[in-house]
Image (spheres, coloured by chain):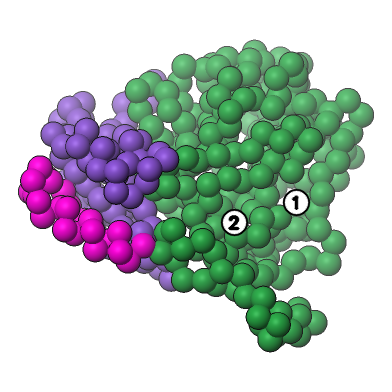
Amino acid sequence: MKTLLLIASLLAGQCLAGPFFFGQQGAVAWQSSPTSQYTPVAHGAASVKWWIAARKESFADGDAVATASDWSSSAVNAMQSTSANRPTFKTGIVNGNAVFRADGVNDGFVLASNPLSGATAATAMFVVKLNTDPPGSGSVTGPVLGEWGTSSQNNHFPWIDGNIYDNTFISSRAITVNPSTTMAQFNQFTIIYSGGNLIWRMNGTQIASASATFALGSTPKVLWSNKESALYYLAGDLAEVVIWNGVLSGSDLTTEENGLKTQYGTP
Amino acid sequence: MTNATVIIITAAVKDAANAAAKAHFDPVGGEFTFTNPIVTPPDLTTITHYWTADRMLPANRALLDVMAAQPPFAGNVQVFDYDADANPGFPHAKLAELGLAVYAPPLN
């Protein structure tokens, strides 16, 4: 059916060509998708406060992405004003879904404000694949969520030793974990701050937790971090990020994680 | 296939390169094109170069070659094209091949 729709679209002259600013040839923007598209929802007091998803964008394959829309009510878009630093939009990469591809050199987004402002807890979920795990010594990767906390240190996803060093939503780096599952494939990660603890989950299983103090940064970044007078960029594909301003637990947590798992076919 | 280009400049021409990027390639945010520092091991603290990677219009790519051959950029700019889909690891591999490395303080 999708093939028929694509052919019909082509015959109707509806090929979607991206802006030619970056010299990319026009490409047909289409993607297969699961029958039911995942949509995150509020759970009690935990509202969806930030949500970017490449699959919901309508760029053409190869386009540079200046703005990744925030599909939550916060409307705090992820932006990149410098053309060379814009991630590349790629269609049909994971289970038929598009991704934001970061080159590990200079690609990443900045938010004008923290959409979690005023929150005292948070849950974040994202689906991502690194080019290599661990990165080579010359390609120390940055985080998916950079500077969402107030730590003066960078967080790494991972450092060259294979460890994730994380300070998302908190005042100082607290998490160190080297997942047994390779990060050079698409995985679903969850970060929860709840009651003085930061918890990391990977593909539905807890992989780390540590005591931490909740503290929100003022200029969050995506796919990079700029602390300690150094810039760290992620090299890989980011499909989707969802952040709630509260704690998801029990069946609510499972429902959202399973929604992403079904959407992307992650383990 | 996604055509991309890695540009490495010496630190000496950083200001001129960012000014040229803004004037000729990216009027909105071009002044931040070369902000990512590179060191030359074994000295891991002295910034010797800056780099960027980008997808460029054919006309801009041609203009880059012209500008790279003229003062103050002649001898201070290295340009490498690659397929970002087939070889996403090219930028860092090229950096290592050139004996350079991304500036990265030790983990603390």
x, y (%) of residue A20?
Answer: 46, 63
x, y (%) of residue A71?
Answer: 74, 43
x, y (%) of residue A153?
Answer: 45, 21
Identity, as a three-letter code, of the amino acid under mark 1: Leu
Rendering quarter of residue A37: bottom right
Q: Is residue A93 above or below residue B102?
A: below
Which residue does the image show at 63% across and 18% down from the upper left?
A: A216
Q: Circle 2 is placed at which residue position?
A: A99
Q: Which residues are magenta?
A: B57-79
**Would residue B24 be seen by someone viewing this image from the given angle?**
yes
Chain at tag 2: A
Q: Is residue A67 located in the magenta-colored stretch of the structure? A: no
Which secondary structure lies at badge 1?
helix
Q: Mark number for residue A260?
A: 1
Q: Is residue A180 above or below residue A6?
A: above
Which residue does the image show at 49% across and 50% down from the upper left?
A: A87
| Circle 2 or circle 1, nearest the eye | 2
Marks 2/1 same chain: yes
Q: Considering depth in this image, is B29 or A48 the residue closer to the camera?
A: B29
- Dot 1, crowdedness within 10 Å: few (<14), some or many (≥20)? many
* Letter of the purple chain: B
Which residue does the image show at 23% across and 56% down from the upper left?
A: B64
Q: Left or right: where does residue A192 sit relative to residue A40?
A: left
x, y (%) of residue A59?
Answer: 60, 60
* Letter of the green chain: A
Q: Considering depth in this image, is A92 or A128 the residue closer to the camera?
A: A92
Q: Earlier in the sequence, mark 2 or mark 1?
A: 2
